[in-house]
Image (cartoon, rainbow, N blue to C red):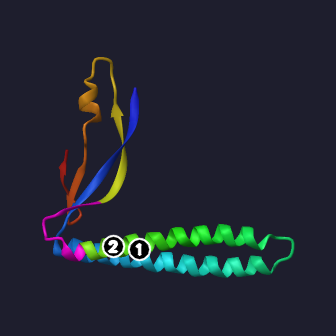
């Protein structure tokens, strides 16, 4: 039998990876801000239509805009932390799914133990 398991991908912080992560975080903030502005535009457009509850429209759109603003704050926090962390630190940057074979007699403890992939400058340096 095979099971699917999520495995974190950690990146060793170097000058190159720091610059790449900064760019990725800035792009994420820009994209989320663009989505917020688009949602606000769509909200105003729907509020003008008759037959649609303005409070319901406002509630739904406010929830989505708020969720994106929270993501922006989290990304900005990650940017600040990126400035503080020294080179050589490991940052969890991604998560992948892996197929794990489970057979009768396997040690469950070994199957569920923490696994991770560590990359440095785009190359896998450890798979543990």
Residue stretch in magenta: 82-92
Q: How many marks?
A: 2
Nearest to the observer: residue 113 or residue 9: 113
Q: Are marks 1 and 2 in contact (CB under 8 Å)?
A: yes
Q: Is residue 36 left or right of residue 98?
A: right
Q: CA distance from mark 1 to mark 2?
A: 6 Å
Q: Which mark is residue 14?
A: none
Q: Nearer the viewer, residue 3 or 56?
A: 56
Q: Position of residue 46 (x, y in %)?
A: 76, 76
**Residue sitting at x 46%, y 70%:** 70
Q: Residue at x 25, y 24 (%)?
A: 107
Residue annotated with mark 1: 73
Above or below, 15 against 91 in this view is: below
For residue 48, side relative to residue 34 (left or right): right
Does residue 19 show up magenta in the picture? no
Q: Position of residue 26 (x, y in %)?
A: 37, 79
Q: Residue at x 25, y 48 (%)?
A: 116
Residue at image location 76% in from the left, 78% down from the top: 47
Q: Nearer the viewer, residue 67 or 110?
A: 67
Identify the residue at the far top of this view: 105
Name the image quarter holding the N terminus: top left
Q: What residue is disc 2 on?
A: 77
Residue 118 position within the rendered picture, expressed as x and y whole percent measured from the top left? 21, 55
């Amino acid at each position: 039998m095979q099971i699917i398991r999520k495995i974190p991908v950690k990146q060793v912080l170097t000058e190159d990876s720091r610059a790449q992560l900064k760019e990725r975080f800035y792009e994420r903030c820009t994209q989320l801000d663009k989505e917020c502005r688009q949602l606000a535009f769509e909200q105003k457009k729907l509020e003008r239509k008759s037959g649609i509850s303005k409070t319901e429209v406002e509630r739904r759109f406010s929830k989505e805009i708020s969720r994106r603003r929270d993501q922006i704050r989290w990304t900005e926090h990650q940017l600040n932390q990126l400035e503080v962390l020294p080179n050589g630190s490991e940052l969890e940057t991604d998560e992948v799914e892996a197929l794990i074979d489970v057979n009768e007699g396997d040690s469950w403890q070994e199957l569920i133990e923490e696994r991770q992939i560590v990359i440095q400058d785009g190359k896998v340096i450890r798979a543990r």
